[in-house]
Amino acid sequence: MRSRARTAVAAAGMTLALLASGCGADDGDGGAGSNKVEVFTWWADGGEKAGLDGLVAQFKTDCSQYEFVNGAVAGGAGSNAKQVLASRLQQNDPPDTFQAHAGAELSDYIKAGQIEDLSAQYKEWGLDSAFPKGLVDSLTVDGKIYSVPANIHRANVLWGNKTVLAKAGITAPATTLPEFFAQLDTLKAKGVATPLALGKDWTQQMLFEAVLISKLGPDKFSGLWTGQTDWAGAEITDAINDYKKLLSYSNKDRDTLDWTGAEELVMAGKAAYQLMGDWEAADLDAKGFKDYNYSAFPGNGDAYQWLADSFVLPKNAKNPDGTKCWLKTLGSAAGQKAFNTKKGSIPARTDADAAAYPAYQQAAIADWAKGTPVPSCPHGSACSQGWQDAVASAQGKFSSDGDVAALQSALVAAAKQYAGK
């Protein structure tokens, strides 16, 4: 069933791509002399769309000579958009710019020669000093920089429905996995059918990674993606068993829901908790739901699992000058404020005024300053797209069969195939 579903999505993506490629220079949307800038994202709903709208408003002010064209393809974490984009790049019909997670995920585009070096623009626009050195270093590949980050997100955040938790007598967040399991048991005993709401695909990978961070700590977790930590180790087996136990507290329809579907269970009081990135704050606020709390996932301590949305200049973009104007706005202080105050993320720049941001972002800015950064595979900062796909396939199977040994063997094989590539 899962294989057929992936095939169907891929076919749908190809259809969309072919439709998109049929709307190129011939209909006036691109080509030499065009003032249109097609911006390809997966920001189509909620706080993500609100953030994009804020950035577009700033772009219209800074780059009034250009016209923004929204190329968004819906689907959490870009699962659908990436398929459409891959087809367009293969057909040499790139959008003027496209969204990609900063970090290792860009390696595929770089190796394929599909995106341009932006190092000169970093110096021209002062981004090499505006962004923290550690971030610039992580964006640099063989001395070149290929993307401009719009933000910093935190992935390992646990969100809770305060009313549901209070009714169960839970007044403080768990700080360890054993404490968290005790809370989930309490919720179940109090009649909460779904103590932990969960969605499909990448949302399950996020939960598993949070468990891995709790088991391994930041350094060993980061070592999983560099070959310094062994995927075949006993600690990984223990983590998989704890993850399997967590799945037993989740909704049985988890493989059919996107992250917003799981979020709705929390909002409706049908679930108590959800592990999700901090874009959830903006989404809940945009939907008028205020009865929530948040904390780092139990056992993660000050580990700040980061990811960044970034944009690139594709080779053979129809309007490279317009794209550069978009990227300059994106990296500017005004652009990052217009975007992040609505998106729920924090600016990548170090000169942001925290007081200008809502409560969650103020806390996140402080946590980012003192926390220990760790990367994320499903969100591209830790691993390549091929590695992401291998992990997604293995965890999708595990959601159905719960075979601990099979999952660990698949993770070992994926690391052996993709590490260092």
Image: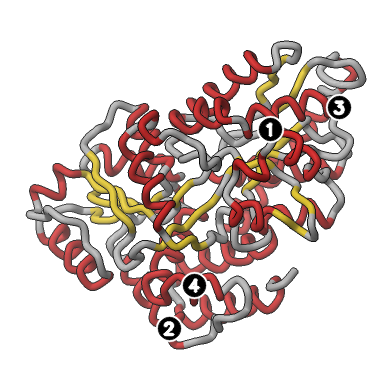
Residue sitting at 70 percent across and 40 percent down? 13
**Label 4 – label 1 distance at C-alpha:** 32 Å
Using the image as rendered, state which of residue 391 and residue 58 is in the foreground: 58
Q: Tell me the quarter of the picture where residue 72 sits.
A: top right
The residue labelled by disc 4 is 221
- The kind of residue tagged 1 is Phe
Instruction: Give the quarter of the figure containing the N terminus.
Output: bottom right
Badge 2 vs badge 1, beta-carbon distance below 8 Å: no
Residue 235 higher or lower than 358, as above or below? below
Amino acid beneath label 4: Phe
- Which numbered tag is attached to residue 235? 2
User: Does the rendering let one see residue 330?
Assistant: yes
Which numbered disc flags the more N-terminal residue, 2 or 1? 1
As drawn, which residue projects farthest toward the bottom? 234
Do the CB atoms of the residues marked 4 and 2 lie less than 8 Å apart? no
Residue drawn at x 64%, y 15% as measured from the top left: 60
The location of residue 197, given as percent across then percent down, is 32, 51
Gap between marks 3 and 1, in whole Å? 13 Å
For mark 1, give the secondary structure: strand
User: In the drawing, does residue 247 fall left or right of residue 15?
Assistant: left
Q: Are marks 4 and 3 in contact (CB under 8 Å)?
A: no
Residue on which the image places disc 3: 318
| Residue drawn where x is 60% and y is 62% of the image | 382
The residue under the point 81% across, 39% down is 314
Query: What separation in Å lies between label 4 and label 3 (alpha carbons)?
Result: 41 Å
